[in-house]
Amino acid sequence: QALPHLEHLNLAHNHLAAGTVLSTPGLGPLPRVTSLDLSGNSLYSGLVERLLGEAPALRALSLAQNSLTRLGRRTFWGTPALERLDLHSNVLMDIEDGAFEALPHLAHLNLSRNSLTCISDFSLQQLRVLDLSCNSIEAFQTAPDPQAEYQLAWLDLRENKLLHFPDLASLPRLLYLNMSNNLIRLPTGLAQGGEGIHAPSEGWSALPFSNPSGNASGHALSQLLNLDLSYNEIELVPEGFLEPLTSLRFLNLSRNCLRAFVGLRAGFLPCLVHLDVSHNALATLALGTRALGSLRTLLLQDNALQDLPPYT
C-alpha cells in the first residue's frame, strides 16, 4: 500500500521467521511486484502462505536456503502468475498432490539440495526446466496420461540414489539430461527386434527411449542433445539402448564399470561429437565403419584396452 509501484523486492538473508511480520498480514498486498527474494530467512512450512499473501503479478520467487519441509496445496495460491520458483537448499521431504496446480505458468523449478526420495506421477506439463539434483531420489515417474504433452527440456537428476534408468518416453522435448552420480545399472540385454525387457522395478524401462506408439519417426528423446551418465555402476550399454538418440551431441559414460562399448550399425549416433568413456574397465571397443560419423572428441584414458579397430 505504501509502495504502490514496487516491482522488485529482495529480502534475502534477513530474520523474517523471527520477526513480527509473520504475526501481521505478512508483506501485505504486492499488486505489482514481479520478483521477490526471500532466501535465507529460516522460513519453515506454514509461514510462507502468511508471508506472501496476494502477489498476482509475481513471476519469480526465491525461497531457497530456508527450512521448508513440505509444500501444501495452498502454499502458492496467492501467486498465480509465477514462472520461476527456486526452492533449493531446504529440507523438503513431502510435496502434497496439487501443490503446483495454482501455477499454470510455472516453467522453471529448482528443487535441488533437499531431502526428496521419490518423484511419482510427475504431471507439470508446462514445466521446461526441472532441477532435482542432490536429493535422495530413488524413483522418477511421470503421470500415466497418454494425452499429456510435456514441455520439459532440461532435467537434472545428478547426485541421487537412482538404481535404474527411468522411463522417459513421455518427455519427447528433452534436450539436456544429467543423471550422473547415481547407482544406475542398465539391463544386460535386449530381446531380438529391439523390444525392451523390463527392469526389476515396476515403472522402469530397459529401453527408456522407445516410442510407445511404435512410430519409428517419432522416437521419444530423439531431440536429446546432452546425456550425462558418468559416476554410475553401468557395466554394459545394451544393444539398441542409445540408437533412438539421433540428435545426441554429447555423451558422458565416464567413471562407470564399462567392459565394452559397441556401436556397429550404420548411422549409430550420427550427430555425436563428444564421447567420454574414460575411467572404465573397457577391454573391447567395437565401432562400425559408418557409426559415429560426426565424432570429434573420443576420451578413452584409464581403461583396459589392448587393441583398437584399425579404422579408429
Image: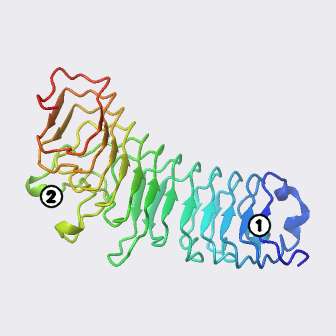
User: Mark 1: which secondary structure?
Assistant: strand
Q: Is residue 216 left or right of residue 146?
A: left
Which of the pair 286/192 is nearer the observer? Answer: 286
Residue in the foreground of this view, choosing between 67 and 27: 27
Secondary structure found at label 2: loop
In which image quadrant can residue 48 be found? bottom right
The amino acid type of the residue labelled 2 equals Glu
In primary-sequence order, the first of circles 1 and 2 is: 1
Quarter occupied by the C terminus: top left
Most foreground residue, 146 or 248: 248
Instruction: Name the residue rendered at 84%, 75% in the picture.
Output: 28
User: Residue at position x 26%, y 52% from top?
Assistant: 199
Question: Residue lying farthest left?
Answer: 192
Question: Closer to the camera: disc 1 or disc 2?
Answer: 1
**173 shown above or below 268:** below
The type of colouring in the image is rainbow
Image spot of residue 251 (x, y percent): 33, 44
Answer above or below: position of 256 versus 45. above
- Residue 136, horizontal then vertical, whole percent: 50, 47
From the viewer's perspective, tell me whether residue 188 is left or right of residue 175.
left
The kind of residue tagged 1 is His
Pointer 1 local density, CA inside 10 Å: few below 14, some 14–19, many at least 20 = few
Reading the image, the residue beneath label 2 is 195
Characterize the local packing of mark 2: few (<14), some (14-19) or many (20 or more) Cα atoms within 10 angstroms.
few
Quarter holding the N terminus? bottom right
Task: Name which quarter of the figure residue 23 lies in.
Answer: bottom right
Residue 63 image offset from top left, x and y in percent: 69, 59
Q: Residue 90 placed where, x, y %? A: 65, 52
| Residue at 20% in and 44% down | 292
Task: Specify the quadrant of the image occupied by residue 12.
Answer: bottom right
Residue topped by disc 1: 8
